Image: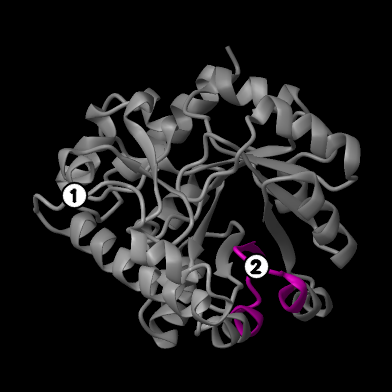
């Protein structure tokens, strides 16, 4: 693929195509990252996908032994992640190539990574936060737009990217709404240096989620994606299955009252996250009617379950048409 500009994600990370396989909670795994690297892109995995620090370290070492490309790790940097300090230490020990920070201040992560030469990319949804992380010294921003999967932003990409370009000097990686090469071309034309794409990779051979989850990515479309508050306490995108319709997407009256209490807010949010995680895990790996499947509108372009390599090849072929 022709590199769009001198500050392309290709130049920043030393990859062939300016694409990050986005970190997906419970979905991203070792084999997906290996195949991403072999396909000329880079994959990023949430540290929280591993139950123990030993499992996390072993996974990174296995990826390193089987491919040569850069490896990324996503860290939740707010207080709800009780494993953050150990996860950051492990990233430093393993000399991870780049870290994507989410849901909190990246200051500690940036300060720890700078001396090691580890790049830090920060999720942002608006100019205000982008300027904050720029001042803290991050290397690039992940512009999380309205069509991102998981925790999306409020602003469409064609508005968010120009706003960020005007206000910041950092490279911009666009997250959300890309499932084909034409959409990728349009995003890069707005000034992004690359894209972060997740949901289409759920329906891949290498993903070890349930066949039902993969088939849902094929069968449902953009119109079936809705926001729910029941998984993490913050709006999160899911497929509008019959079960989601049955249980609703809003927190109940008591939960809304409790989250307004400054002392209880953090604990209620942690409890919501814990319950939501269990629901996601149960649906992702088991055959169940209680289907809560996380995904973004980019599932619109997914027509079959394919290998990671084929997803990348088709995206690149469409981009270069």
Asked whether residue 2 is in view, the answer is no
Q: Secondary structure at mark 2?
A: loop
Dots 1, 2 in contact, CB < 8 A: no
Q: Position of residue 36 (x, y in %)?
A: 47, 48
**Mark 1 highlights which residue?**
291
Q: Is residue 254 magenta?
A: no
Circle 2 residues within 10 Å: few <14, some 14–19, many ≥20: some
Front residue of 311 and 278: 278
Q: Position of residue 15 (x, y in %)?
A: 65, 46
Q: Which image quarter holds the N terminus?
A: top right
Residue extent of the magenta highlight: 91-109
The residue sitting at 30% across, 50% down in the picture is 206
Circle 1 residues within 10 Å: few <14, some 14–19, many ≥20: many
Give the side of residue 152 with respect to residue 17, left or right: left
Residue 2, by quadrant, is top right
- Which label was assigned to residue 104? 2
Q: Is residue 106 magenta?
A: yes
Please, is residue 229 above or below residue 76 in the view?
above
């Amino acid at each position: 693929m022709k590199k769009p500009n001198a500050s392309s994600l290709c130049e920043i990370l030393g990859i062939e195509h300016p694409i990050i396989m986005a970190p997906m909670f419970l979905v991203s795994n070792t084999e997906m990252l290996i195949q991403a690297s072999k396909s000329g892109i880079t994959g990023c995995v949430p540290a929280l996908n591993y139950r123990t620090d030993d499992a996390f370290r072993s996974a990174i070492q296995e990826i390193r032994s089987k491919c040569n490309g850069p490896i990324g790790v996503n860290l939740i940097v707010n207080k709800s992640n009780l494993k953050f300090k150990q996860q950051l230490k492990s990233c430093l020990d393993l000399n991870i190539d780049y870290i994507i920070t989410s849901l909190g201040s990246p200051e500690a992560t940036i300060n720890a990574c700078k001396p090691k030469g580890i790049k830090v990319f920060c999720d942002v949804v608006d100019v205000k936060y982008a300027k904050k992380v720029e001042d803290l010294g991050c290397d690039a921003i992940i512009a999380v737009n309205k069509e991102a999967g998981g925790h999306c932003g409020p602003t469409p990409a064609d508005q968010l990217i120009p706003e960020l370009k005007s206000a910041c000097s950092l490279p911009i990686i666009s997250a959300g709404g890309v499932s084909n090469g034409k959409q990728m071309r349009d995003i890069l034309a707005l000034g992004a240096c690359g894209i972060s794409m997740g949901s289409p990779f759920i329906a891949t051979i290498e993903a070890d989620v349930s066949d039902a989850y993969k088939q849902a990515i094929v069968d449902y479309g953009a119109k079936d994606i809705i926001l729910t508050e029941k998984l993490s306490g913050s709006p999160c995108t899911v497929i509008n299955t019959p079960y989601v319709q049955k249980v609703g997407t809003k927190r109940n009256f008591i939960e809304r009252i409790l989250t307004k209490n400054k002392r209880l807010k953090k604990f209620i949010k942690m409890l919501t996250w814990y319950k939501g995680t269990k629901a996601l895990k149960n649906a992702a790996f088991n055959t169940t009617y209680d289907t809560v499947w996380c995904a973004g509108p980019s599932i619109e372009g997914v027509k079959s379950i394919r290998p990671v390599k084929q997803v990348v090849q088709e995206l690149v072929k469409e981009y270069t048409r």
